[in-house]
């Protein structure tokens, strides 16, 4: 019988800077991403390209246009994005502009490799 995967959620919030929500790597384990959420507290000044990464590999990417505000992105993956063995999962949101507070959330589960 296979072990039950452990679920997790990672959150990062910051103002006027790069935001990275990261699930750190665990030896001999593989993380999978089942959902992400990105929001800004005020209208974004810059267009940004959000990436979901496993180590150095980009699993998903999408552009957020200027003027986005509120929780503008909730993405549930019907088929979870599967990360590599021994690799961290990171959602990266570049600086959206001066005084813009950004929150990135990534959720998923972890299994032994």
Image (cartoon, helix red, strand yellow):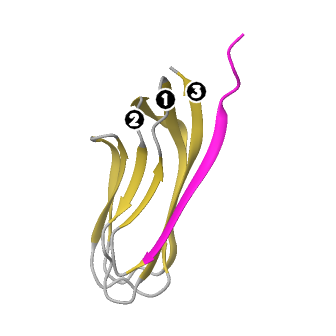
Residue at the spot x=32%, y=88% of the render?
98
Residue carrying label 2: 87
Residue at the spot x=35%, y=81% of the render?
16
Residue carrying label 3: 111
- Pinpoint residue 29: horizontal percent, then vertical percent: 51, 26
Mark closest to the chain's N terminus, 3 or 2: 2
Mark pair 3, 2: CA separation: 12 Å
Dot 2 lies on which element?
A: loop
Dot 3 lies on which element?
A: strand
Give neighbour class at mark 2: few <14, some 14-19, many 20+ (Cα, 10 Å). many
Residue 26 appears left or right of 18: right
In depth, the one of 85 and 93 nearer the eye is 85
Dot 1 lies on which element?
A: strand
Give neighbour class at mark 3: few <14, some 14-19, many 20+ (Cα, 10 Å). some
Marks 1 and 2 close (CB-CB < 8 Å) = yes
Q: Main secondary structure of the magenta part?
A: strand
Mark pair 1, 2: CA separation: 7 Å
Mark closest to the chain's N terminus, 1 or 2: 1
Would you say residue 88 is visible in this rendering?
Answer: yes
Q: Magenta residues?
A: 1-14
- Pinpoint residue 30: horizontal percent, then vertical percent: 49, 29
């Amino acid at each position: 019988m296979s072990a039950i995967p452990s679920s997790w959620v990672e959150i990062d919030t910051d103002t006027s800077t790069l935001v990275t929500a990261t699930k750190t790597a665990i030896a001999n384990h593989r993380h999978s991403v089942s959902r992400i959420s990105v929001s800004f507290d005020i209208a974004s000044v810059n267009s940004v390209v959000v990436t979901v990464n496993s180590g150095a590999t980009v699993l998903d990417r999408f552009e957020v246009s200027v003027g986005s505000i509120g929780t503008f992105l909730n993405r549930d993956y019907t088929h979870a994005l599967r990360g590599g063995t021994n690799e961290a999962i990171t959602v990266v949101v570049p600086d959206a502009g001066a005084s813009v507070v950004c929150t990135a959330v990534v959720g998923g589960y972890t299994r032994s490799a």
